[in-house]
Image (tube, rainbow, N blue to C red):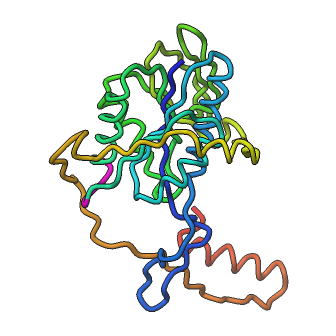
Amino acid sequence: MNIIVCAKQVVDASEIKIDSSTNKPILEGISKKISDIDKNAMEEAIKIKDKHGGKITVVTVGSADAKERIKELLAMGADEGILIPYPDKYDYHVVSTLLAEAIKKIGEYDIVLCGEASTDLFSGQIGPKVAGLLNIPQITYAQSVDAEKDNVVAERNMGEKSVTTESSYPVLITVTKEINEPRLPSLMEILGAANKPINDWSADSLAGGLEPKIETIDLKGVSMERKNIVYKDSLDESIGKLVDNLAKEGVLG
């Protein structure tokens, strides 16, 4: 079973602070990591490999320091990593095209696994876009995956209900964080990851002349100003006033 995992390096959102004077996020100096749900995708890939054998290749579009994050996935159990440095300008269209072209260059594959969304932007666009560019079936929001020799069956989380979906290979699957608990590699696995290859593929060698279709104009934090209203009446009266004010603010229907 040849498995490809698409992973993204992101900033640790828990460390982001907002500059009070500009209302812009302070991103400099923040530690980076593999997007949490991409680690769930990696864990699922390992389970499938343990069952059927084969190879796991990690593909990342990111900055040069993403190699250190790829090593984390190699320590978990991936066999090979591929890093495609960001071009000067990029958006979802550019990134998904580069991922799709890299997968085509890899050649034979059975399953492409992605997190349902990255933990920084959480758009959920990359997986479906890559599947469309590859012209292969896709199963999104998988909360369980049962990969057999000739087909895969996944239970999809659709909010208030779940849907069981079956597909032949090749197929792209995006997983939710509920699907598993990613393993922590041992010291020996971390040391062994240094001997596994990480290849650099340039964006131009995969798809030259790509231009983004979306331009990010600005990035600002969400205002979190508080009204600081204190109710000093009796409990029943305070609750009544609180409910009335929440209704006026549109919080309650």
Q: Which residues are magenta?
A: 88-92
Q: Residue at x 35, y 39 (%)?
A: 99
Q: Residue at x 22, y 46 (%)?
A: 204
Q: Quadrant of residue 181?
A: top right
- State the quadrant of the N terminus: top right
In the image, taking residue 1 as reference, residue 192 lies left or right, namely right
Q: Main secondary structure of the magenta part?
A: loop
In this picture, is 148 found above or below 107?
Answer: above
In this picture, is 38 found above or below 230?
Answer: above
Of residues 98 and 240, the one nearer the viewer is 98
Q: Quadrant of residue 103?
A: top left
Question: Seen from this angle, which residue lies furthest front?
Answer: 195
In this picture, is 160 found above or below 216?
Answer: above
Is 227 magenta? The answer is: no
Q: Position of residue 138 (x, y in %)?
A: 43, 26
Of residues 197 and 160, the one nearer the viewer is 197
Q: Residue at x 15, y 48 (%)?
A: 209
- State the quadrant of the C terminus: bottom right
Q: Residue at x 64, y 75 (%)?
A: 244
